[in-house]
């Protein structure tokens, strides 16, 4: 049966040698807690998702990106141990969301009931002739950065920022992601229109837009959801936007 399927795809004259054939089963697993005192679980050790949309690898990288700067802040004395609890607050809901997305794909590709099978057959049949039905074909949704729900470290929740072209004050070209790389473990505080952060610390690098950094196309304030009149925002080392208390 396996050789017939392969030859139907690649041609009947292809030579095959089977080294191993075994069953494959979609599965998803999620730990209740990603932190147990001094032990942190990331990637497949914390969650297992079905292989759709590159969510396994991407989610593991996002786990490491989230936890890495928080460990650095605690080790450098920039934050207390409770910052590490926000790893669970942010990455556990993200993993649960990824599992929900891949479960829907799994049930479309491998229906678990006659009703789900009829739905899939109807969608596939309609997709041959109608564009609207093609959007219903669920062969996997590509991984995206998860939005974080409100929690102690992010009272208003958090979303990722996208890369934007910027300039240094001397006119040298740069980008938002390049600035984050240069900041290392520090968060970036972008200040607009004379706004100033209430407090400064070694954990934060302040950049005044229009003075330190130029935004020739005016995209930065709009992308960060700010009024350029007088506002400020923090961008964390993991490229998530956070609230920045300011004094105008």
Image: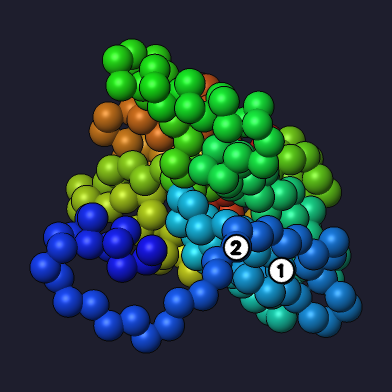
Work out whether 62 lies above or below 185. Answer: above
Q: Position of residue 157 (x, y in %)?
A: 71, 39
| Residue that protrudes farthest toward the bottom in the picture | 19
Q: Position of residue 230 (x, y in %)?
A: 55, 27
In this image, 116 relative to 79: left or right? left
Work out whether 154 lies above or below 183. Answer: above
In this image, 144 relative to 177: left or right? right
| Residue that protrudes farthest toward the right in the picture | 37
Q: How many marks?
A: 2
- What is the CA distance from the residue labelled 2 to the residue labelled 1? 19 Å
Work out whether 44 lies above or below 55. Answer: below
Query: Residue at position x 63%, y 45% from top?
Result: 103
Foreground residue among 209 and 55:
55
Mark 2, other Cα within 10 Å: few <14 / some 14–19 / many ≥20: few
Dot 2 corresponds to which residue?
25
Mark 1, other Cα within 10 Å: few <14 / some 14–19 / many ≥20: many
Disc 1, SS: loop
Foreground residue among 121 and 214:
121
Q: How is the image coloured?
A: rainbow
Q: Nearer the viewer's eye, disc 2 or disc 1?
A: 2
Foreground residue among 166 and 33:
33
| Residue that protrudes farthest toward the left in the picture | 13
Among the two numbered marks 2 and 1 on one chain, the one whose residue lies closer to the N terminus: 2
Query: Residue at position x 74%, y 40% from top?
Result: 149
- Residue 212 seen by the camera: no
Foreground residue among 23 and 131:
23
Q: Which of the image's four quarters has the C terminus? A: top right
Dot 1 corresponds to which residue?
46
Query: Residue at position x 46%, y 56% from top?
Result: 54
Res. 91 mark: none
Q: Position of residue 187 (x, y in %)?
A: 57, 57
């Amino acid at each position: 049966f396996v050789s017939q399927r392969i030859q139907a795809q690649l041609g009947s004259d292809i030579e095959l040698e089977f080294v191993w054939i075994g069953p494959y089963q979609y599965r998803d697993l999620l730990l209740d807690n990603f932190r147990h005192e001094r032990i942190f679980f990331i990637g497949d050790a914390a969650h297992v998702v079905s292989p759709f949309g590159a969510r396994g690898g991407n989610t593991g990288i996002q786990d490491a990106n989230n936890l890495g700067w928080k460990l650095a802040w605690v080790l450098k004395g920039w934050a207390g141990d409770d910052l590490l609890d926000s790893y669970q607050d942010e990455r556990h809901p993200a993993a649960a969301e990824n599992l929900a997305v891949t479960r829907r794909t799994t049930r479309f590709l491998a229906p678990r009931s006659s009703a789900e099978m009829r739905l899939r057959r109807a969608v596939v049949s309609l997709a041959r002739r109608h564009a609207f039905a093609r959007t219903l074909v669920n062969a996997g949704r590509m991984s995206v950065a998860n939005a974080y729900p409100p929690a102690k470290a992010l009272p208003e929740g958090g979303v990722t920022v996208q890369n934007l072209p910027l300039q240094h004050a001397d006119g040298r070209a740069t980008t938002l992601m390049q600035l984050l790389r240069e900041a290392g473990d520090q968060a970036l505080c972008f200040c607009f229109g004379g706004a100033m952060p209430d407090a400064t610390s070694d954990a934060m690098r302040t950049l005044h837009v229009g003075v330190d950094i130029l935004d020739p196309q005016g995209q930065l304030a709009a992308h960060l959801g700010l009024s350029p009149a007088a506002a400020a925002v923090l961008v964390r080392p993991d490229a998530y936007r956070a609230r920045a208390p300011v004094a105008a």
